[in-house]
Image (cartoon, rainbow, N blue to C red):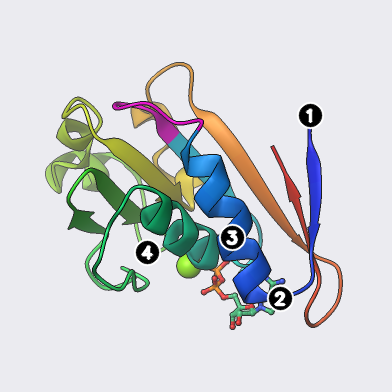
Amino acid sequence: MAVFLSHSPEETRAWAEQYAGTLSAGDVVLLEGEMGAGKTVVAQGIARGLGVKEDVLSPTYAYVNSYGPMFHFDCYRIENERQAMELGLYDYFDAGKICLVEWSENIRGLLPDGCKVVTVKKVSETAREIVT
Ligand SMILES: Nc1ncnc2c1ncn2[C@@H]1O[C@H](COP(=O)(O)OP(=O)(O)O)[C@@H](O)[C@H]1O
Ligand SMILES: [Mg+2]
């Protein structure tokens, strides 16, 4: 287990940019943490590390956004695994891209084995503990 203490959103992005270098095609990374912890900020940094030029925004209303080598999921509004199946979310995990998943607890039964986990904990208004 590794712990990093970030003092700003940019520091979190910079950490995540480095973390992206440890990922391989097909990896599924669960981004854990409460609302507003910084999961999407981590996704932005990972995207930067993967060379994605587009802005990574929260996909809350789309469930999943596609950015070149990665998919970014936000399963907050998914109510059950049946709904996730109907949305076809399962197929994304087999596409050989890096999958970043927020609120993965809502699709637990669909997740492949061997997921990586990044947990972001709010320590103060501007400080975050990032655990891998
Ligand atoms: N050190 C930090 N790392 C990441 N985000 C931070 C940090 N300090 C403050 N923030 C703020 O916390 C919020 C995190 O939002 P977001 O990434 O959308 O959260 P989540 O996706 O976990 O709901 C942003 O408004 C961001 O500016
Ligand atoms: Mg988010």
- Residue 123 position within the rendered picture, expressed as x and y whole percent measured from the top left: 86, 68
The residue pinned by badge 3 equals: 14
Label placed on residue 8: 2
Q: Amino acid at mark 2?
A: Ser
Q: Which residue is mark 4?
A: 77
Q: Quadrant of the C terminus?
A: top right
- Residue 68, how many percent across, how many down? 17, 50
Real-space Cα separation, disc 3 to disc 1, in angstroms: 19 Å
In magenta segment, residue 26:
yes
Find residue 1 and name its label: 1
Q: Earlier in the sequence, mark 3 or mark 1?
A: 1
In this rendering, the label closer to the viewer, 4 or 2? 2
Where 108 sits versus 59, above or below? above
Amino acid type, callout 4: Arg
Q: Disc 1, ligand 1: is the CB inside 8 Å?
A: no
Mark earlier in primary sequence (4, 1)? 1
Q: Is residue 86 left or right of residue 59?
A: left
Mark before the other along the chain sequence, 4 or 2: 2
Q: SS class of the residue under badge 3? A: helix
Closer to the camera in the image, 75 or 14? 14
Q: Nearer the viewer, mark 2 or mark 1?
A: 2
Q: Does 43 appear above or below 104? A: below
Q: Nearer the viewer, mark 3 or mark 1?
A: 3
User: Which stretch did the figure color magenta?
Assistant: 22-28
Residue 9's label in the rendered image is none
Q: Nearer the N terminus, badge 2 or badge 1?
A: 1
- Mark 1 element type: loop
